[in-house]
Image (cartoon, rainbow, N blue to C red):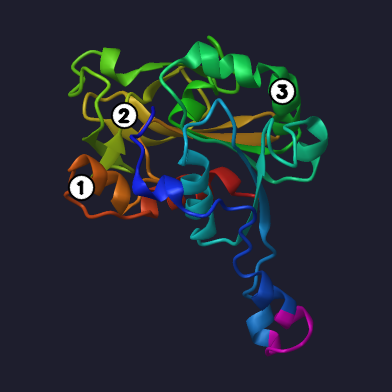
Amino acid sequence: MTPPVHSWYRRRPLTRVVPAVVAAVLTAAGCSGADDSRHVSAPLSALVYRGPAACDGCPESVASLLEKAPRPFTVEYVGPDEEIPLTATALADADVYVQPGGGDDLDAAWEEVKGAAGAIRDWVRDGGRYLGFCMGGYLAGQNPGFDLLPGDTDAYIASRDASVRDQRDTVVPVHWRDEPRHMYFQDGPVFLLDDGADATVLARYDNGTVAAVVAPYGRGRVGVVGPHPEADASWYEDEGLRNPDGVRLDLGHDLIEETVSGL
């Protein structure tokens, strides 16, 4: 769940990412043709948690993934030391809430965010979108967690026939929409879905367990993933790892697009 201290952790902190906003403003002002304006989407608003329940650099890495997504996003950070606290008021103005990767202690992470659990559940039930990466995937479960999934979570490394049995940073094979791929991984969850659950399984680990899934929760949606589709080249370089597919962001973007569908 916790990547090592990579060089990108020391980059300038991101306070707001506003891709495509200038294009949208120019279009609204009539600076482009009428045909072009039909192809400019209003940015979606994403709140990314940054605080003790997240590992250093993980919120910024997820923010970068959102910045590069096919649909434009504005991104702001929420957390105990941010200008915006994680509250029902903050969520009310957002389309997406993101819980990024965190440390190795699920109980400790839960202690940091459980005060917002009711607000998050109510917001998703009313149509909000939750994205959880690694620790954020664990926290979408029940024990402990926000209880947003039709089922629960467990550690992949403890699952039967898992190809990884320890907490080291590594690369794991998955099948994403039935296509063989490889992903950065560090002690991420599997998702244990109830029988007959209304859910779209995006990816499975090599032992058949669920690695990424999107499921409805009330009028909202929950998208979670165990490995790290937000990992950039520095994650691999710093650990001496290689992704046989190359470092690509398309799987993370697929998760995002499936989760925000309908907005």
Amino acid type, mark 1:
Asn
Where does label 1 land, which residue? 243
Where does label 3 land, which residue? 116
Residue at disc 1, secondary structure: loop
Amino acid type, mark 2:
Gln
The answer to whether the residues at label 1 and label 2 have Cβ atoms under 8 Å apart is no
Residue 258 on image: x %, y %: 51, 46
Q: Is disc 1 surrounded by few (<14), some (14 to 19) or many (20+) residues within 10 Å?
A: some
The answer to whether the residues at label 3 and label 1 have Cβ atoms under 8 Å apart is no
Examine the image and state in which quarter residue 24 appears: bottom right
Give the mark nearest the N terminus, 2 or 3: 3
Q: Nearer the viewer, residue 202 or 19?
A: 19
Query: In this rendering, would 40 be left or right of 59?
Result: right
Query: In this rendering, would 175 be left or right of 103?
Result: left
Examine the image and state in which quarter residue 35 appears: bottom right
Give the mark nearest the N terminus, 1 or 2: 2
The answer to whether the residues at label 2 and label 3 have Cβ atoms under 8 Å apart is no
Amino acid type, mark 3:
Ala
Q: Which residues are magenta?
A: 26-34
Q: Give the CA distance from mark 1 to mark 2.
A: 14 Å
Examine the image and state in which quarter residue 9 appears: top left
Where does label 2 land, which residue? 186
Q: Is disc 2 surrounded by few (<14), some (14 to 19) or many (20+) residues within 10 Å?
A: many
Q: For the N terminus, which image quadrant?
A: top left
